[in-house]
Image (cartoon, rainbow, N blue to C red):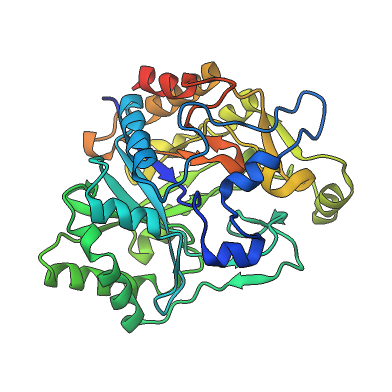
Amino acid sequence: MKAKVLAYYLPQFHPTPENDQWWGKGFTEWTNVAKAKPLFRGHHQPHIPADLGFYDLRLQEPRIAQAEMAKEFGISAFCYWHYWFGKNKKLLNFPFEEVVRTKKPDFPFCLAWANHSWYSKQWSSNSTGHIMLETATLLMEQKYEGIEDYTTHFYDLLSAFKDDRYFKLHGKLLFVIFDADNFTDFPRFKQVWNELAKKENLPEFFFIAHYIVFNTGDKLEKYKSMGYDAVNFSLHAKPFSLPENSTKIMEIIRKHFTLGPKIVDYKKAIQIMDSPLYEHEDIFPTIIPNWDHTPRSGRFGRMFKNCTPELFKEHVRKTIERIKNKPEEDRVIFLKSWNEWGEGNYLEPDLEYGTAFGEALKNEL
């Protein structure tokens, strides 16, 4: 295998009391996916799942089927999005906790802490790459409560960290932090978790900062100085960045007065998402098979058009070429994503292409 591929995995495919309250009884990620409509001629919506169907992650069977398929496509591990808001408040935790409890599927995993607040609307860009209205209502605030809460957080996940399936890099437990910029207390968090790991006879953590790149700039040194072991660069937002001679007012006008989403051809996008920065030993690239945020944000969304398995294969090939001279242990690629259906960003089979995107990844690996 030319690279280890870690696939970000969204657990929001089961009802929760909070989502019932905020969005209506029985809401899951499938709600927005199924009701999506084309916004212009040639816009393919809705995207309908094929082999795995509209699954419910409360059930073990789809979780096992996903892992078997991911293994077939050459994916090394699922990187589950994890939601901890402080003071033992967590959301969407059931599927992963069942994976740990039942010991199934027999497939490697790690965690990515989605440490950001939740809002009622997500329409325009903010500093973390989310999309939100200025008038959005705060639903769940991300808080950092200090040593006691960091300790509680660690022990809540201890059974996962002790699981033989937990993915390690350089012999350490891999853990991704989504919003590294706003987690200013990270150095203390790292110290607490590594001390607790030692106490529990576990290896230390390999902490990765997830960075959504909008324009140019290398934040590697900043994150390394904070204590991160590496950075996962995701360039999916960069194709939508403002031209250098554009102004903030022009972007506001575009967002609020245009009749459709912001569109970039995927063939152009994969060129922009290729970067020599990926050759750095401590930067892990991200591959993006597709993107269409309109099921969540309508005409305020962003999307790549003309996403095909052939172009994705080219994207994967370019990325592997960037990392081929790294030490074998550091030839790591993140896939965004395994199942972000509401963002039109998934590798799972759909009715349009079947398993072709997964086969493209497998063939390049």
Q: Is residue 250 left or right of residue 296?
A: right
- Residue 361, compared with residue 100, is above or below; it is above
Which residue shows up at 19% across the image and 73% down it? 195
Residue in front for this viewpoint, 282 or 139: 139
Which residue shows up at 30% across the image and 30% down it? 71
Residue 202 place in picture, x, y as percent: 14, 62
Q: Quadrant of the N terminus?
A: top left
Q: In this rendering, does residue 216 appear at all? A: no
Residue in front for this viewpoint, 101 or 189: 101
Which residue shows up at 54% across the image and 31% down it? 49
Q: Is residue 299 left or right of residue 181?
A: right
Residue 343 place in picture, x, y as percent: 60, 42
Residue 29 place in picture, x, y as percent: 57, 48
Which residue shows up at 44% across the image and 19% down it? 360
- Residue 143, compared with residue 23, is above or below; it is below
Q: Quadrant of the C terminus?
A: top left
Residue 364 place in picture, x, y as percent: 38, 19
Residue 352, quarter of picture: top right
Which residue is the extreme one toward the left? Answer: 201
